[in-house]
Structures are given as structure tokens and as C-alpha cells.
Amino acid sequence: MHRVGSTGNTNNSSRLRKEKRLTYVLSDSDDTKHCAGINGLATLKSSVSNGPDYLFTGSRDGTLKRWALAEDAATCSATFESHVDWVNDAVIVGDRTLVSCSSDATLKTWDALSDGACTKTLSQHSDYVTCLAAAEKNSNIVASGGLGGEVFIWNLEASITPISKFHEVMDDDCSNGVNGSGNSLIMTGLHTISSNNNLSSPTSHCQGYIPIAAKGHKESVYALAMNEGGTLLVSGGTEKVVRVWDPRSGSKTMKLRGHTDNIRALLLDSTGRFCLSGSSDSMIRLWDLGQQRCVHSYAVHTDSVWALATSPSFSHVYSGGRDLSLYLTDLQTRESLLLCTGEDPILQLALHDDSIWVASTNSSVHRWPAEGHYPQKIFQKGNSFLAGNLSFSRARVSLEGSSPAPVYKKPTLTIAGTPGIVQHEVLNNRRHVLTKDTAGSVKLWEITRGVVIKDYGKVSFDEIKEELFEMVSIPAWFTVDTRLGSLSIHMDTPQCFSAEMYSADLNIANKPEDDKVNLARETLKGLLAHWLVRRKQRVGSQANGEIVVPGKESSTRSLIHSRIEVDCSTENDAKVYPPFEFSFVSPPSIITEGTRGGPWRKKITDLDGTENEKDFPSWCLDCVLNNRMPARENTKCSFFLQPFEGSTVQIHTQGKLSAPRILRIHKVINYVIEKLVLDKPLDSSNTEGSFTAGSALGDGSFRSGLRSWPKLKPSIEILCNNQMLSPEMSLATVRAYIWKKTDDLILNYRVVQGR
């Protein structure tokens, strides 16, 4: 588990922002496929005759998927989307409850057989939640562990309010709740569980529920396991010890030492007597909890052990890890077999009948033969070896080149994923992003429409980047990361409103070419177009034409009015221009930090107008509903306009000039022509046209009043640092690429005769 900046973890966020962030995630692939590694696997047997069994996958792309299993096929029948960061684990609780945990510091519950709607969000962890454990015969209990060193035991039946409703019943004062570590505590509508595991009445103030805390870990927790009855819990992590707990009270019962590195996987037998552990020290250990000691050590792997699964009788263990290999080991005889090898480190295993599902850092999942009901049958194929009891014994064998041959060469079934994005470059036009995925394919994205506009195939990323280079300067109005295997576009106020372009440059028809278009504003309108339509259908427009953001007090609205500016250059409507129309075939997903319910993620086509508007950033709603944007800075560029050295012409100006940063040089040329005074006029008979010099250049300064040059009109060139400028350059581009200084820009002009 690599510590990487999270898209959604607001509890320990290093970004100290007064305003919430809005993120949208792009995808050009089939929504039925994952685009990042698979961290979690869970299986569910069919409850009806002739019905399919199901496999659930939780991915680093932030989603879970349900697969209907057949003998030779697996069909995606639902996508579970609400987490805003990696899904790190998933378990089935009871008959049909799916529980997942994520690096967004939350647990979420789902109806496993539904269309993918989240039923509950549990937020108590202060950092990434890395692992889960469930009691097979107790459908109420789930344990969770995370990087904060916390282990919590949850009673799922204590819930009294579904996630879609609890916003409405919670007191506003609850949002100020703080947990013991000083981080914001997002309360969920659950009953409290006392230390003796009895349900008590919900608290009257915040409808809050505090799970049982198993306190003792001082460092990160990576692995949990629970026995069938939910009476025993084991945990392990970076402290290299196995801790044993009573989950009914959260009390410690013992601590087992033996591993020399992080513990990454744990299993308990049904009775809770025996425990298996896998570690980054490459060892598998079998513990007798009754004797409180390690009874066997198995040196099978040559690198970290990250995943374990056992046969139903707990007689054999399947293990995988960083060495890309899946082994089967007889716990009694110590006989081992290499079942298969892959191309990626193994992250998770799930036994299903006589097969085993293997998940890795790749976005695909593979099914291999396992003979789960009679593992000894595989040993009859031969080529087994005796597992040593010291880690260096396997490492030595590997170095000697005598590694065993795998029993199986190909999986019996593969659920294919799509390549995830691993490299990106934001181009200078601030609308296109170049990406490279794990398969080596290079693509060009238009992020204001969320589509791939060109697929270059497997070519050099750097060569394409150089080919697409443009000498243009537009403010950085968004940031990008590819942590989820796809493009996540982050928008923060007020920075996101800093970029503007002329409508002519965006090829917007039926709009004056000099109209300025704010890229963030139009992108937000495109993202929320479906939501705006559904919202209007539900609540309608207000009589005075202004739609007020629900929940805003009048004093708050007055404060907002004092800090924003109304964009009068465009109509206050929901019209979406073509350069900002998002695809409904592969629609992006919106991620917002939410309020008391925590962060959430949803496709823009799934927004139905019933969402709590307090979950959206207020600046975002103020923009799309009321056509208002925060006051922006540095939208102007100051410069001096001076004759080129040796030139005999001059114009009347009032010192320093100011113009929009996006102003083109051809506008400056028009300004010079308008203000031009020649020592010897080219046509002395033309005495018309006196011009008043001004100190500000605007977009409309040159539409009238130009001097009439009946015989010869001068041709003007604008220079900077002795370099002639293209008429299509903007002032911002000249400053960034030609002037390259922090002080005021100096432009020179000269007349070229003969036109």
C-alpha cells in the first residue's frame, strides 16, 4: 500500500482550503471494465436454484463491480460507485450485504444484488481504511483497520437511517463533532453499541454511532481476520506482530511475535484456534492460539506474501504475493506446489468451488484451477517441493535457478480490464491532456468534453508531446492526477475561473467572436447540464427568476454577493456550447467532498436532482445557478507601447497601458493605427480623424473610428525583445515566452511602408 495523495480523504488532507473542491473523473472505456489494479475480491453463492453465483471486485479505480459467473464467462451486472479513492477491500456480510473500504477513509455498505446504490456510509477512520473482516455466521459484525493504527468493530444492524436520508435528520451542530485524534468526525445515523455488544438507543442529539475500538496498534494495520461466530479477531501490520482481540469488547487477549517484517495477510479457521499469517518477510506462519505460539513456518515464496486463502477444511493454504506466483501448500506435510505465475504482483485471492480467483496490480482478474474441495488431487500431478522453515532457504533455491515449474500455464477464465493511465501532460492550451496507459497507448483528451480526440497508438509519448507543443499561455485552471487509473480533473476556486478564451478561438457559432468565454464556468455548465434539467423538473424556477441555493441564510448570501462578480458578457442560462458538451456514452463521474455524509462519487447522468445541494461546493452552484463567479485577479496585463529603435513614428499614449491577458497582438496593431501620428503625413490633404489617446485597451476598442488612408495605409509590426510578434499571439503568451521578465511588458511598434 503506497502512501499517495488522496483525491477524497479530507480528514488528513494536506490541502488547507476554505472552499470545497469539485473533481470529475473521465473514462473513454466500457464501464463494465476496471481500469486499475484489483485490491478486493468477494464471492456470493446464488440463493435460488439455477441462479448464477457472483464475484465482486473492488478496484483502485474507486469502483466495485458485480460479475455473474458461468462456466466459461463472467458478465458485469452492476457497478457500485460512490467511493472517491481506491477501494482496498470488500466482504460479503449475511445474505446480500456488500461492505467495502477505501482510501477515502470510509466504509460503505451496498445491497449486493441491487443496481449499485450505496445504502450507508460509515466514517470513523482518520486515514486510509485498508482491510475488512466479517463473521460468516454473524451477519451484524464487520471489523475495519487502517493506516491510522485504528481497528473498529461495527454492528451493521445498528443502522437506523439510510445514507440518502440522514442528511435531513441530522442536527447542524453535529458537523462540529471531532474524534479523538482531532480530525473532523463525520457521524452516521447508527445505534450505539456498548462494550457488552448490546444495542442501545440512538443518541438524541447527533443520531451518532461510535463503533467499538480495538486500541493497541501504534502503527498501520494491513490485515484482519475473524472467526465464523465473530468471537475472535486478529490483526497485523507494520508492527510485525499478530494481535488477538475479543471483538465484543475490543479488549486484547494476546500478542504473537515471530515475523520480521510487515504482516500483510491473515486467516482464522472456523473455530478460531488456528491462525495463518503472511508477511513481507516472505514467510507464512501457522499459529496455535490456544498455545499462543507459532507451530509451523513455511518458506514458500521468494518475496512478500500479500494474499492467503484456505481450503474449507483449513488443511491447505493458497498464497500469492510480490513474486508474481501462486502456491498451494499442505499445512501438515509442508508439501508445496507452484500452481501458476503471472506478470503482476498478486494482491488478493478468493476460492470459489474448485477454482480460485486471483487479483493483481493489473486491472484484469484470472480464474485458475484449485481443486478447493480436494487440493491433494493437484499434488498427484507431481513437481512438488518441501517448504523450508527459514526465509533464506527459498531465496537460495531461487538464486540457484532451480525454481519449480508451474502446474498450470493458462487461466481457465479471464475477466479483462482496460489499461490504466500512468503518464499525462497538460498541454499549453489548457483544454487538451496527453496520456499514456499501461499498454503503451498514447491518447489526446479534450477535458472540457471528456472525450479522446485522437488515439496515437503505441508511439513515443515525448515525441507526440513535442509535436503538439504550442507557444500559448493560458492560466492553469485545473489540476490533474491519474491515481485512479483515469484522468481526475480537480477544480478549486478561485483559481479555476482564471482562464478565458475568445468565442472565435473555440469556434462557437452564433456568438460574437470577441466574447470572452470562461472555461471553468462553461465546463461546470456542461457537467451539471443533466442535473440542472432534472432539478428544474422537480423544483421549478422561482418567480423572480433567481434560483436560490437551499440552506443559505440571507446573511450568508449577502456576504457571497459582496465577494463575487456577475458575468454580464453572457446570458444567464443553462445553454451548453459544443466545446463543453460531455459524452453521455461514457459520461464522467463527479466527486465532491460532501457535507456530513462524507465524500461521494456519481456519474453525471445518474444525478437526478434530488441530491442535497449542500453536498455541492457553494461556489459551483453559485456559478451554474446564478451566473456568478468569484472575483478574479491578474486577468489584465500592463505594458508600455514604444516606437522601435530608429523609428520616426510615434503615437499619443498616456503612459502604461492595460488590456486583458488574452488580447491578441492584432488588436494592438489596430490600436497603433488608430493612434498613429506621422511627422510627414502620407496624405496631407486628409485632415480628418483626430484621435484621443487612452490608457486602456479593450476588446471593442477598434471597431470604429479608424483613420481613412485613401492612398496608402501603413503596415504595422509589433516587436518584443527585438523579435517580431505574430498577430495571433496573446499578451500573456508574449510575456511568458518572449518577454520572460517580471516587470511590465514593453512592446515596440514600427511602420512598414509599401502596402
Image: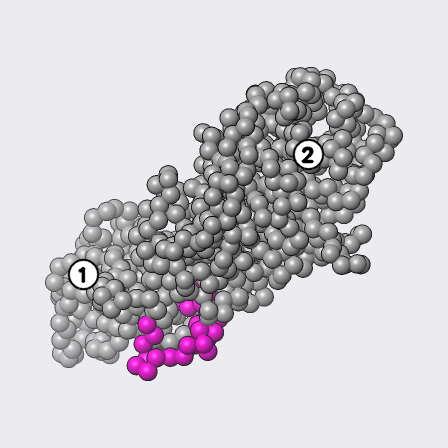
Q: CA distance from mark 2 to mark 1?
A: 82 Å
Q: How is the image coloured?
A: one colour
Select label 2 or label 1 by which is in front: 2
Q: Residue at x 67, y 59 (%)?
A: 77
Q: Which residue is mark 2?
A: 271
First to last magenta residue range: 521-548
Q: Amino acid at mark 2?
A: Thr
> On the picture, is 469 further left or further right than 649?
right
Q: Nearer the viewer, residue 295 or 667?
A: 295
Q: Residue at x 46, y 69 (%)?
A: 610
Residue at x 76%, y 47% (from the top left corner): 413
Q: Residue 539 falls in which quadrant of the image? A: bottom left
Residue 755, quarter of picture:
bottom left
> Relative to 621, is 149 on the left or the right?
right
Magenta span main SS: helix
Query: Residue 646 appears at what percent x and percent y?
Result: 18, 54
Q: Which residue is mark 1?
A: 657
Residue type highlighted by circle 1: Leu
Q: Secondary structure at mark 2?
A: loop
SS type, badge 1: strand
Q: Earlier in the sequence, mark 2 or mark 1?
A: 2
Location of residue 251 in the rendering, given as x and y in whole percent from the top left corner: 50, 32
Name the residue nearer the viewer: 323 or 552. Answer: 552
Q: Is residue 546 magenta?
A: yes
Near-viewer residue (640 or 329): 329
Q: Is residue 406 above or below residue 444?
A: above
* Magenta highlight on residue 389: no
Left or right relative to 94: residue 635: left
Tell me the crowding category of disc 1: few under 14, some 14 to 19, or many 20 or more residues within 10 angstroms, Cα based: some
Give the x, y percent position of residue 285: 65, 24
Residue 73 in view: yes
